[in-house]
Image (cartoon, rainbow, N blue to C red):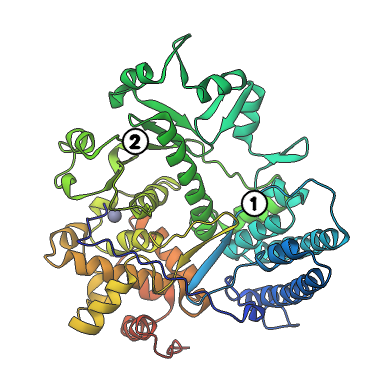
Amino acid sequence: MQLLRKTPSRIFIATLMGGVLAGYCAVARISQATGDEEGPNLYTQYTTTFLQKLDRLASACDEAGETDLAKRIRNWMPQRAPKKIYLFHPDSPATNKSRKSELEQTFREMCVQHGEELLELSRRLAADGQVTESVMVLSEAIYHAPHLPEARRLLGYQKDGDRWITSEAEKQLAEGNIWSDQFGWLPNDHLPRYQAGERYYHGRWISREKDALLHADIKRGWKVETDHYEVITNHSLEAGAQIALKLEQFYSVWWQVFANYHISSEELKKMFSASGIPRSSLKRHKVVYFRDRKDYVSELGRLQAGIENSWGFYFENRKTAYFYPEEKDPEKSTLWHEATHQLFSEMRASHKVARLKNNFWITEGIACFMESLQPGANFSTLGGLQEGRLPAARARLEQTHFYIPFDRLVALSGSDIQRDPDIQKLYSQIAGQATFLMVADNGQYRKGVTDYLRAVYRGIARPETLALKLGVRLVVLDNQYRDFLLGRQTVRPEP
Ligand SMILES: [Zn+2]
């Protein structure tokens, strides 16, 4: 559960740095594990070269008076900020189909070539057992080269004319349906009438107002289904489609950054040699979106004590996440938080988190880390010292010296944490610690913390598991975390 914060602490500060040509690597430690002798890091090497080519091409566009294209080329890659993870979306906006200039043609060819390089790198990473890195690089390959057939097939897409679609889209299209961002999947010929304010209900056309009355009870709410989610809502069909779209965007990020959690290295190797990565889990994740707080509390109050103090809730026993529109949470951090609980619980067979006798903190910490998600059209970011609860964590550490060391934290159960009178402070601290484990030193602990999460969710973690998975003493980790949060020189870990 995400507890209410006294003041919404999300402050978006664009900390984008210059120095793009450094091309710094969001995908950690690639070269070591690929055993590559030729350079310190193949990903960085490829990216740096690509950025240099883009920069030269953008200058050529300026000289030729193609300023729009120059701008597009300069915005093609993110300007990476430190302590953030960048995730590219395979479904980047369609490219302009009109006749291309020679410079635009060069830009497309350059991107395709870079995409091909990244596909090859992704294969090498998979062969080397670097699952998350391989999947992140594969998604980026498609961003640059949307029509790379092998990369598309690996991610479960199928060709449909001149576009690539998911298996769910293929099924819907075969049934004569069309996707609308406003209403979800609809029969093709229904869309104009929906746009005109009519609604189809049990074989007849009715007004939007009548339709709203018929769906006012959540038990008879609208249902919006997408590739990975089923959203029930009594707010409006439009709100259901909007939440489903946000959740799909979230899924794409979570699926990449925690690939190591839900795909084993053997599975990934097999996928590269066979048919591709199954992107859809077998069952859709269930989400209920109430029209208001009153409905949310009255429906869930009998299931969970303290529900009135929350903005959203993932109920493990029902495998369902519940939300309502909360104006104090415009950036949807509650949605990201509860959706994180849901995916960690449902993407693998898992132990009930509520029954954990220790290591409970990471289940909340990682959900607080995911609150930092900044979704974008081409790529999204996670982490950053200015996002989510991190400013609060830093202020508390600096000003009040509030800090529970890792060795005490790992021993706490769920009820220890939920009963703690300092729970607000603790949540900001664990947000900071989880962020540190995910992004510090270019993600050197990312694989270890994902392995730790697997152990925790399987119910087999012990108080010593965190140190064992990361290969570092917890007292050293405490110091590294302080340095990370306070912006001091990072202490290198023990060998
Ligand atoms: Zn939570």
Secondary structure at numbered mark 1? loop
Task: Report crowding for label 2: few under 14, some 14 to 19, many 20 or more residues within 10 A (C-alpha).
Answer: many
Q: Decide which of tag 1 and tag 2 comes sooner along the chain.
A: 1
Farthest residue to the top: give it.
204
Q: Amino acid at mark 2?
A: Val
Horizontal placement of 334 versus 45: left or right?
left
List the residue tagged with mark 2.
Answer: 288
- On screen, residue 214 above or below 343: above
List the residue tagged with mark 1.
Answer: 92
- On screen, residue 275 above or below 77: above
- On screen, residue 117 above or below 1: below
Query: Residue visible at 36% across and 51% down?
Result: 341
The circle drawn on residue 212 is none
Give the foreground label among 1 and 2. 1
* Front residue of 204 and 477: 204
**Are dots 1 and 2 in contact, CB under 8 Å?**
no
Query: Residue visible at 49% across and 30% down?
Result: 183
